[in-house]
Amino acid sequence: MADFHEFYPLRAHNTFGFDSHARLAAHIRSESDLVSALSDPRAAGLPVVVLGGGSNVVLTGDLDASVLLMEIPGYEVGHDAANWLVTVGAGENWHATVGRTIADGMPGLENLALIPGTVGAAPIQNIGAYGVELRERFHSLRALDRQTGQFVTLDLDTCAFGYRDSLFKRDGRDRYIITAVTLRLPKVWQPVLNYGELARELESIPAPDAAQIRAAVIAIRSRKLPDPAQIGNAGSFFKNPVVEAARRDALSAQYPALVSYPQPDGRYKLAAGWLIDQCGFKGLDDGPVGVYGKQALVLVHHGGGTGAALLGLANRIADTVEARFGVRIEPEPVIL
Ligand SMILES: Cc1cc2nc3c(=O)[nH]c(=O)nc-3n(C[C@H](O)[C@H](O)[C@H](O)COP(=O)(O)OP(=O)(O)OC[C@H]3O[C@@H](n4cnc5c(N)ncnc54)[C@H](O)[C@@H]3O)c2cc1C
């Protein structure tokens, strides 16, 4: 039998800090905890919601669901000819894992330092920052396939990673519960310093090592992003929209300061933060929710507000951006 709690408070389990209660919730500390929670008759017929650190979700009310709080530990190092293969439990903290692998002499995750949340959630949106995405450091993962009831190993190709996207946001949505992730860290390490802001931060260090890059990423992020322990937020609220070259050219003719980045497929990624800023939303306060003053891409909750109010503000922003630029920006967090 699973160790279920009834009417379980989730405020401490979402970085926006919204009030919400789960009909049932269980702490999942092993694969057998997971199996018993899924087969427990008390949860029969209830939808299942998987939560890691809650740093990429918007809770819009109470969850009439069985909420699984992923806390599976684990850290095991193996290797093949070219790589360290580090298998980490889904419930381990991502940022701590970045620090631990570097301290253990296996660099490669330094650009992804200080991203909140768990290791098990990292593949869901293929987390990325400062020129590196998880997929570049990913070997495989282990998950429970809820369709067959079997544990499976999924490799890089099967996970179909894209920009803030993967199998788990598409066909595999609600199908897989990830219990461990195997990271692939090349034994011959190459720093990734092609992100302008990071390169500038490290200007005074001729050949920075992974620990120095990690420290620089932490310094930049701490200046730019609100700490969820102080102000409720989920990091970037909108994904950067990707548009055809013709659309980008037309927009940049009209708005010469438009910020855009060429993509390998010939399209362009537009900076959603710039689009929102141009519409005058940066720093807006809408009662208990608002837009962060230092970064227009981040929506914030000051306390006492609701996920529904935040979504109302998000829609207003997306509608205004679309009316002005003809481009729809989509939310990054999962709305529950
Ligand atoms: C201040 C701040 C900065 C951020 N910066 C970045 C950034 O730079 N880059 C970036 O990519 N993201 C960023 N994020 C978003 C977030 O940190 C990541 O998406 C992170 O991976 C979410 O982890 P989590 O454990 O909190 O997931 P949760 O929010 O708990 O869950 C997110 C989704 O994953 C699912 N899920 C979670 N665990 C599992 C599992 N074990 N198996 C199956 N499904 C699961 C949930 O059901 C949900 O759909 C930021 C967030 C904050 C608050």
Image (spheres, rainbow, N blue to C red):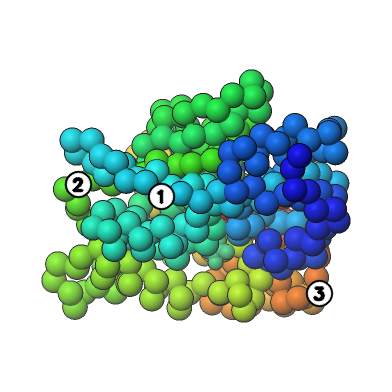
User: Where is residue 306, by image quadrant?
Assistant: bottom right
Give the labeled residue for mark 2. Answer: 187
Could you tell me which secondary element the residue under label 3 belongs to? loop
The three-letter code of the residue at mark 3 reads: Gly
Query: Residue at coordinates 71% horizontally, 56% vertically from top-left?
Result: 58
Report helix, strand or loop for mark 2.
loop
Q: Residue furthest top?
A: 148
Q: Which residue is mark 3?
A: 304
**What residue is rendered at 25% in x and 39% in y?**
79
Residue 172 coordinates in the image, percent (x, y): 60, 30
Q: Is residue 215 above or below residue 126?
A: below
Please report the residue visible at 19 percent of the width from the left and 68 percent of the height from the top: 208
Distance between the alpha carbons at the discs numbered 2 and 1: 18 Å
Q: What x and y, as percent, mark residue 332?
A: 60, 51
Dot 3 beta carbon under 8 Å from ligand 1: no
Q: Which residue is mark 1?
A: 75
Which residue type carries mark 2?
A: Lys
